[in-house]
Image (cartoon, grey):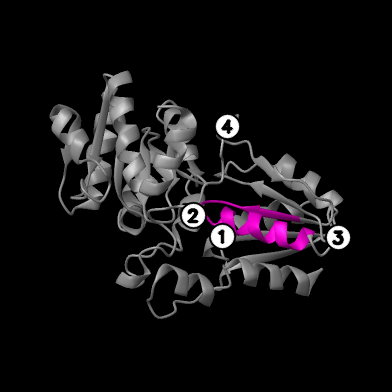
Amino acid sequence: MTMEKNIKLWSSLGMRATFGLIALELADQNPDLIITTSDVSTSAGLDRYKNKYPNKYIDVGIAEQNLIGVSAGLSSEGFKVISTTFAPFQTLRCCEQIKVNLGYMKHKLCMVGLASGLVLGNLGYTHCSIEDIGVLRSIPNITIVAPSDPFELYKCLHQAINHDSSVYIRLTAGSNSKIINHKDYDYKIGKSIKLVSGDDVTIFGCGNILSNCVEAASALSKENIRCSVINMHTIKPIDSNTILEEAQKSKLIVSVEEHNVIGGLGSAISEIVSEEKNDTKLIRIGINDFYSSGGSYEYLKNIHGLTTEKIIHKIKSNI
């Protein structure tokens, strides 16, 4: 199958099912790989993997603190380990274990947070994850990555299992996720990617919400507002050089994320910009530090100003 066909297939399947397919390839290539989960084999697309590689798969049950402890122990014995469960349980429920085992003791682990952001809003905010970036950014020795689409997840996972620190991979959107990258491209953890070029506004985004950023930039260009769109897939360590370059040339810089505006991508960008002499205004688009009622993915994106139309309105109101 050609890469173009793979991209279309992975997009229709979404991040989680694509993760399961990538896991099969990684296991073929890495005899020392083990995947650990907390009772989410079907949700993570791992049923085929666990049947094909039963000795490379450990399900600890609904015990996420144990998930990190077991995974860190396997890592200390030389295994490449990917742990996965839903994002709020992968990060918040076992935060102390992440701090001690991965941050302090520096055991290397690739953590995959399923269905982060707002996509599980129908289950309520117990299953949404709008705090994970902010929490993990404050723990040393953790790299944080939010792939824009399933193809980028493919590239990210192949690098993450060999990365020099623990990596948290934040998966957003559901099935039929928007395609950001229609053909092959260079990808490196820690280095942002310019998707669209323009001199008036720079929009920084991460995760599948980038599709709305690209749509907003296209619409604004018809009104002679020229926008750059930057895929800031790595939130930690963040690409500070690109942030400063864009801030120097743009009239307005904007961050867009499925995360609390406190602690996430926008906060990371503001930390960089505030340390330099720069007069460019930054606006942060995301969840404004409150929990709304539950609802569908599109409903919650609308409530929190994350639709294409509301991103356009926010930019036009500030430029």
Q: CA distance from mark 1 to mark 4?
A: 20 Å
Q: Position of residue 275 (x, y in %)?
A: 76, 52
Q: Residue at (43%, 46%) from the top-left corner?
A: 11
User: Depth check: 224 or 145 in front?
Assistant: 224
Q: Mark 4 or mark 2, which has the lower sequence index?
A: 2
Check the image and report above or below for 48 versus 295: above
Q: Residue at (30%, 58%) from the top-left corner?
A: 93
Q: Mark 2 or mark 1, which has the lower sequence index?
A: 2
Helix, strand or loop under label 4: loop
Q: Position of residue 109 (x, y in %)?
A: 36, 35
Label tally: 4
- What amino acid type is highlighted by mark number 2? Ile
Q: Residues within 10 Å of mark 4 (few under 14, many from 20)?
A: some
Query: Which circle, 3 or 1, is nearer the viewer?
Result: 1
- Residue 203's disc is none
Whether the residues at callouts 4 and 2 have beta carbons within 8 Å, the answer is: no
Check the image and report above or below for 141 versus 127: above
The stretch in magenta equals 202-221
Check the image and report above or below for 154 versus 32: below
- What amino acid type is highlighted by mark number 1? Glu
- Residue 187's disc is 4
| Residue 68 appears in view | yes
- Residue 133's disc is 2
**To which residue does mark 3 refer?**
279
Q: Mark 2 or mark 3, which has the lower sequence index?
A: 2
User: Depth check: 190 or 123 in front?
Assistant: 123
Whether the residues at callouts 2 and 1 have beta carbons within 8 Å, the answer is: yes
Q: Mark 3 or mark 4, which has the lower sequence index?
A: 4
Quarter holding residue 279? bottom right
Q: Residues within 10 Å of mark 3 (few under 14, many from 20)?
A: few
Quarter holding residue 62? bottom left
- Residue 257's disc is 1
